Image (spheres, rainbow, N blue to C red):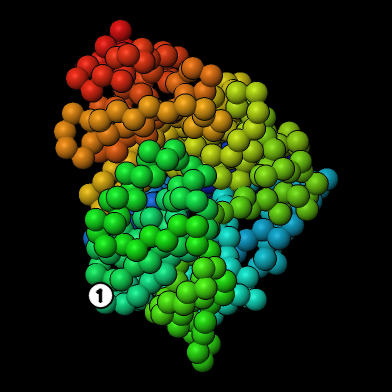
C-alpha cells in the first residue's frame, strides 16, 4: 500500500492542489501528471498578453522548475492517464508506466468543442484557444490586415476579437443565438459589450451560424453562413464552448453527469478519488453546477487539499469571474443562473456601469463594466447575504456604500 497522491491534470487546479498540500505541511509523496510538454502555467494571459507579445511565457509559470523537486512533487510531462483501476488503486499512463496511489485527484479540466470535419473543422487554419500550443499557432496567424472569422459570441470569442483588432486584423464574429453572451449574461451586458466591439470596427453578426467552411488545398479560405452569405477568411477561431473532460472518470465507473459528480468535500463516488475545477459537478444551493473559472479551480482544489490533509470543512463556492477586452474590464461576482430580473446602474465615471441580477427578489450576481466600486460592493453583499435596497441601487447619485450598512 502507498500513501502517494497522484494528480491527473497539471493545470490551475492540479498545481493548486499540490501547492496547498505542501503549504499545509502534508508530506505525502505527490505525482503530478501533465499532458503538455511545459511546466504548469497560468492560462488566462495566454489569449491576451502572451498572444499580444506583452508577456514572456516564463512569466506565466506558477513556479520555476526547481520548486517541484524542492517540494517532493514528482512531475511527469508529455503523458496522460489512459485507465484507472480502482480495485488495485493504479493509474496506467500513455507512456506505458503504472502508478500506485493511495489517493487520486482528477483535475482534468475541460475540452473545447470543435467543428465537425463534415463542415470543414479539419481544415488547416481552424483553431481553438485553450493552451500554449493553440496560442503559439494563433500568434503565427495574427498579422495586420488578415481576415479572421470568430465562431461564437461568448467571452472566449469576444476576447479573441479584441486581441485580433488590437493587432490590426479584420474581425467578423458570428453568433447563432439571438445575441452575443446569451448563455452567460443579461441583455444589458450584451448590449454594452456589443457597442464596445462595434466601436472598434468588429463586425458582429447575430442570429447567424456557420453552414460550412470553404477550403483550398486543405486550408480554410472562406465560410458559407446560415443566412446564405459567403465571406473570405484567412483563418478561423472556434469559441463555441467547452465540455468537461470526464471520460477517464466515466470509464473507471465513477458517477458522471455533465462533469465528475463530487460532494461538498470534492470527493467523487469513490472516497479515495477527488475531483476539482472545470471537470467537477459540485453541489450548490440545492442543485448542481460546474464553474469554469480560475477562482473555482483554485478554491475547490484548496478545499480538497485541506480534506485530503485531514480536514472536514465543506467547500462553499463564492463565484467570481473576469474578462478583459480592449481597455474594458468586466468583473462578475456571483452566478446569475436562473435570474428573473435585472437592474442597469450607470457608474460614477464615463464608460462605467453595472448590471445587477435578481432571482425572486434576491441579489444573485453583478456584472461590473469598468466599475470596480460596483464589483467590490456587490461581491461583499453576496458574500455576507445582504440584499440591496432597490431604490438606492436604482439611484445613480446614491453612494453604493449605503448598501453595506
Q: Quadrant of residue 118?
A: bottom right
**Residue 281 percent location from the top left of the image:** 64, 38
Residue at horizontal 42 percent and vertical 69 percent from the top? 149
Q: Viewed as shown, does residue 253 lie left or right of 265?
A: right
Residue carrying label 1: 144
Q: In which quarter of the image is the C terminus?
A: top left
With respect to residue 123, does 176 lie above or below?
Answer: above
Q: In which quarter of the image is the N terminus?
A: top right
Residue at horizontal 18 percent and vertical 28 percent from the top? 348
* Residue 135 vs residue 373, the one in the foreground: 373
**Residue 266 percent location from the top left of the image:** 63, 33
Residue at horizontal 51 percent and vertical 68 percent from the top? 227
* Residue 207 vs residue 93, the one in the foreground: 207
Q: Is mark 1 on a helix, strand or loop?
A: loop
Residue 219 appears in the figure: yes
**Residue 247 percent location from the top left of the image:** 71, 54
Residue 306 appears in the figure: no
Amino acid at each position: 500500500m502507498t500513501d502517494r497522491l497522484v494528480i491527473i491534470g497539471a493545470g490551475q487546479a492540479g498545481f493548486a492542489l499540490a501547492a496547498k498540500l505542501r503549504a499545509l505541511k502534508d508530506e505525502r509523496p505527490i505525482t503530478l501528471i501533465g499532458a503538455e510538454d511545459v511546466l504548469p502555467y497560468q492560462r488566462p494571459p495566454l489569449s491576451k498578453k502572451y498572444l499580444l507579445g506583452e508577456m514572456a511565457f516564463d512569466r506565466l509559470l506558477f513556479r520555476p522548475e526547481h520548486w517541484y523537486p524542492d517540494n517532493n512533487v514528482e512531475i511527469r510531462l508529455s503523458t496522460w492517464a489512459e485507465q484507472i483501476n480502482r480495485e488495485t488503486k493504479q493509474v496506467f499512463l500513455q507512456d506505458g508506466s503504472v502508478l500506485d496511489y493511495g489517493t487520486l485527484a482528477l483535475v482534468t479540466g475541460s475540452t473545447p468543442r470543435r467543428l465537425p470535419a463534415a463542415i470543414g473543422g479539419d481544415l488547416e487554419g481552424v483553431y481553438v484557444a485553450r493552451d500554449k500550443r493553440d496560442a503559439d499557432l494563433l500568434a503565427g496567424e495574427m498579422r495586420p490586415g488578415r481576415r479572421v472569422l470568430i465562431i461564437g459570441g461568448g467571452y472566449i470569442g469576444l476576447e479573441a476579437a479584441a486581441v485580433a483588432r488590437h493587432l490590426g486584423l479584420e474581425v467578423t464574429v458570428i453568433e447563432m443565438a439571438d445575441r452575443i453572451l446569451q448563455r452567460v449574461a443579461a441583455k444589458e451586458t450584451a448590449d454594452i459589450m456589443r457597442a464596445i466591439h462595434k466601436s472598434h470596427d468588429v463586425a458582429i453578426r447575430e442570429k447567424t451560424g456557420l453552414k460550412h467552411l470553404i477550403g483550398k488545398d486543405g486550408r480554410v479560405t472562406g465560410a458559407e453562413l446560415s443566412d446564405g452569405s459567403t465571406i473570405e477568411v484567412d483563418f478561423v477561431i472556434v469559441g463555441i464552448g467547452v465540455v468537461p473532460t470526464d471520460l477517464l472518470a466515466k470509464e473507471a465507473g465513477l458517477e458522471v453527469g455533465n462533469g465528475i459528480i463530487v460532494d461538498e468535500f470534492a470527493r467523487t463516488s469513490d472516497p479515495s478519488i477527488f475531483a476539482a475545477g472545470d471537470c467537477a459537478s459540485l453541489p450548490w444551493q440545492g442543485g448542481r453546477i460546474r464553474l469554469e473559472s480560475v477562482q473555482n479551480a483554485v478554491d475547490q482544489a484548496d478545499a480538497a487539499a485541506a480534506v485530503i490533509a485531514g480536514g472536514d470543512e465543506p467547500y462553499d463556492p463564492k463565484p467570481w469571474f473576469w474578462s478583459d477586452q480592449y481597455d474594458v474590464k468586466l468583473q462578475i461576482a456571483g452566478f446569475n443562473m436562473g435570474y428573473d430580473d435585472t437592474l442597469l446602474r450607470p457608474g460614477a465615471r464615463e464608460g462605467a456601469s453595472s448590471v445587477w441580477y435578481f432571482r425572486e427578489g434576491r441579489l444573485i450576481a453583478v456584472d461590473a463594466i469598468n466599475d470596480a466600486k460596483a464589483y467590490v460592493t456587490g461581491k461583499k453583499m453576496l458574500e455576507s447575504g445582504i440584499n440591496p435596497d432597490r431604490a438606492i441601487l436604482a439611484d445613480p447619485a446614491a453612494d453604493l456604500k449605503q448598501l453595506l450598512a
